[in-house]
Image (cartoon, coloured by chain):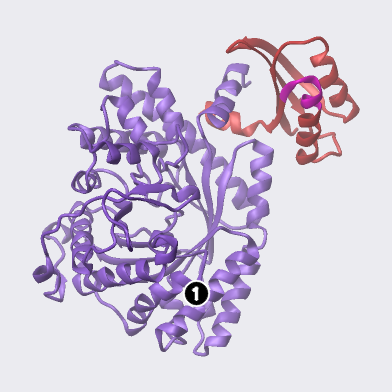
Amino acid sequence: MINIFEVHETNKMIEQENLDVRTITLGISLLDCVDADLDTLCDKVYTKITTLARDLVKTGEDISLEYGIPIVNKRISITPAALVGGAACKSPEDFVRLARTLDQAAKEVGVNFLGGYSALVAKGMTKADELLIRSIPEALAVTERVCSSVNVGSTKTGINMDAVRLMGDIVHETAARTADQDSLGCAKLVVFCNAPDDNPFMAGAFHGVTEADAIINVGVSGPGVVKYALEQVRGADFEQLCETIKKTAFKITRVGQLVAQEASRRMGVPFGIIDLSLAPTPAVGDSVAEILQEIGLESVGAPGTTAALALLNDQVKKGGVMASSYVGGLSGAFIPVSEDQGMIQAVNAGSLTLEKLEAMTCVCSVGLDMIAIPGDTASTTIAGIIADEMAIGMVNQKTTAVRLIPVIGKDVGETVEFGGLLGYAPIMPVNRFSCEGFVNRGGRIPAPIHSFKN
Amino acid sequence: MKKAIITVVGKDTVGIIARVCTYLADNQINILDISQTILDGLFNMMMITDISGTDKTMGDITADLDKLGGEIGVVIRCQLEDIFTKMHRI
């Protein structure tokens, strides 16, 4: 039987160490909504989302109340919109209309984000893919809750450099279209390599074509819990450090597993995966950077940061896979800048640079995330940064992503405020040497030799 | 049997257990086990209860106990047992 100390430990994690379930994400296939007529398509999409997700928010709230665990976000991911809208959308404006429908559906069911305004163009772009990509700046400016992602490379296919070059322009245009909100549109746009089909986290969530009609994916959190546990083993050797992270990750993931199973049962929708990422928030004590500092760094970015992050990421996975039979999504440690108080402090202190963040993405689950850069950064330079990050993902057979925010009208030394979970960020300097000749070549970077495993 | 864990945390005072038990008895909630201790300098009590006999929903019970806790000056929580067993038992 459970004892008072175990109950106390769990409740302390929730109340004092920011343990929560970050998101219940309902994945919905919209492939059966495809229609050549745009009005009909929008009607079908709206009806399917608002029908399937009708009880999502209430279910999340009920589970949260009954188990006493906060469930911060209830969200929806859909089949990449380029596939859904391909038959009906003949122009970027047509795709924007679909985006507005998605936004309305998200508002109707009360979710705070809907992901999947996406295109998968790792090897090449269809006409529909290109139209969708060109519609992204407008779509993210006129909608509130729609999130967009574009997968431009994979280990199996290489990197579509035409798409990378185009995304340099699109990121810049998205920033310009939302300049009055400090270029907030870019916070809802991710460029991926090796994008997972079952990621529950925004802004990169979409419902892959290999998935069932509907599925529940859950993302857990808990940087504060890991940090607190590590405070108890200060000065201990690496074995004890790793054991502590693993045990803590196990406990966190078990809560996610429970919530996922309950949500699945109550909604009558199959359970997909648990994404066992450490997802920070701007709240004090909910920071991945603080974990790295607790491991022994004066400030994130100091020598040893990449090794410490590699260790952390690996132990989180080892503890997490024991706790759930189905682990997927991004699963690892997130290192966004604006959403993590410790990262923001490290940038302000001068210990963390864009280049060091890039090195860190070689060993953790995501990429260059929520990084504000000067608004006058050339779109070719943005494309170059994307290409570098995609290459890391392609060669290392892992997911990498880029979510850069070129803040129009602002420069290094200034700060940008996004609010809420998106936090705030100091604008980071970018290498000013040009890569124009490289990114303008056109075509594809071939798949690496170690991808030929057949 | 549907088990819920009720925890009471706060400054020790006369009649805490009596008032909580009265509420549970009035609502057909059976107490299976009680333990108490001082943790972090605060009075901590835990009850393992069976809520399958009550007409009230978890939402009602949680709200009622929250209100009762406010009257006594302690924090009272009611949570389904699974969150603790899943976390602490393999």
Please say whether residue A320 is one of the residues in the magenta stretch: no
Q: Is residue A127 above or below residue A341?
A: below
Identify which amino acid the numbered label 1 is placed on.
Ala
The chain coloured purple carries which letter? Answer: A
**On what subunit does the disc labeled 1 rest?**
A
Question: Circle 1 is placed at which residue position?
Answer: A99
The residue under the point 26% across, 27% down is: A298
Q: How many marks?
A: 1
Q: Position of residue A109 (x, y in %)?
A: 64, 63
The one nearer the camera, A148 or A60, is A148
Q: Is residue A219 above or below residue A312?
A: below
The residue under the point 42% across, 67% down is: A178
Q: Position of residue B27 (x, y in %)?
A: 88, 30
Can residue A454 be seen at all in this image of the molecule? no
* Snapshot quadrant of residue A351: top left
- Badge 1: few (under 14), some or many (20 or more) residues near its Cα, within 10 Å? many
Q: Is residue A177 above or below residue A432?
A: below
The chain coloured red carries which letter? Answer: B
> Which residues lie in the magenta part?
B68-75
